[in-house]
Image (cartoon, helix red, strand yellow):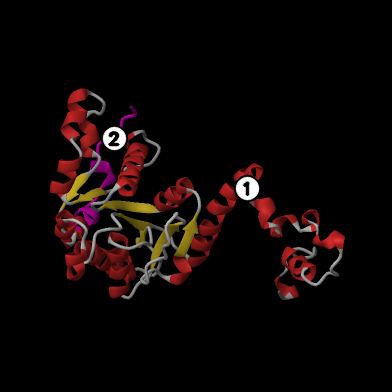
Amino acid sequence: MKDENRKHPMRYARQDMEQAREIPDTPQTRAPAYRLAFADDDFLCRAELRPVRLQLELLKPEMALEEAGINSTIVLFGGARIPEPSKKDTARTETLAELSSFYDEAREFARLMTLKSLESDSKEDVIVTGGGPGVMEAGNRGAIDAGGCSMGLNIVLPHEQAPNEYVTPGLCFNFHYFAIRKMHFLMRAKAICVFPGGFGTLDELFESLTLIQTGRMKRIPFLLFGEAFWRKIINWKALEDAGTIGADDLELFRFVDTAQQAVEIIEGWSPEDAPAAHPT
């Protein structure tokens, strides 16, 4: 670190971290108590340090995205198990094979939105996915098709995984906390697009809808790809008939089946035309 880049006259923490690696090996220096607190994994992973870890997980991606100039995003949620059409014969169920068409729709949607993003000098409407396989891979792949960048918000899971190969490396993040990860999905969102998926997708769908319904988040285009799928797995009318949601809550989202439909809705979106969300 060059002296001219210093913002204060004090010694930098990194300098002490590097010097601490060169200290004499003695019983005192080997003791855990002697480690620098911010360079001590055992200390940072203690239960009492959870508030600090939450803050760090919020800050690291936020600072990186700020430095990268990412101003707004288009969110793609969707299933990791949906294969691309050329591999649909390997799908575990017939339904997944049928849903493989949405891989292509997600890829095309991301391509079209990225092309529009590249028309501006600033980094607006950057595609963001969960960074995994399936629909997420298709979204990041579509951004590559258009010659643009895209984000991936991965999370550590019990089974082995890695980000898909199409996420822009400098915009690929890994999370421990689902809650912080979902915050990062929505903090810059200009539109939310939800493709068929499982528990994780449903979790993301309903948390996002709840934030909009209760006025905790402003109305933005909220598109569900695959009307037949979503009407089959969720009885939206039953919720309205039961009175657990209002009729106007069903206007918080729109069904679409193609990338072009989604792009047209986003392009024609006018917040003034949207009905106000009502708290439950």
Q: Residue at x 39, y 68 (%)?
A: 167
Q: Is residue 108 left or right of residue 4?
A: left
Q: Badge 1 is on which residue?
A: 52
Q: Quadrant of residue 151?
A: bottom left
Task: Name the foreground residue: 87 vs 245.
Answer: 87
Query: Residue 147 in the image: x percent, y percent?
Result: 32, 76
Q: Residue at x 31, y 49 (%)?
A: 201
Q: Secondary structure at mark 1?
A: helix
Instruction: Determine whether 243 is above or below 200 in the image.
Output: above
In the rendered structure, which amino acid carries the disc numbered 2?
Ala
Q: Which residues are magenta?
A: 264-280
Question: Which quarter of the image is occupied by the N terminus?
Answer: bottom right
Q: Is residue 64 left or right of residue 120?
A: right
Q: Secondary structure at mark 2?
A: loop
Q: Quadrant of residue 146?
A: bottom left
Distance of label 2 from label 1 (alpha carbons): 36 Å
Q: Residue at x 72, y 67 (%)?
A: 14
In the rendered structure, which amino acid carries the disc numbered 1?
Val
Instruction: Determine whether 168 is above or below 45 in the image.
Output: below
Question: What label does residue 276 carry, if any?
Answer: 2
Q: Is residue 10 left or right of residue 229?
A: right
Disc nearest the viewer among 2 and 1: 1
Question: What label does residue 115 carry, if any?
Answer: none
Instruction: Determine whether 140 is above or below 190 in the image.
Output: below
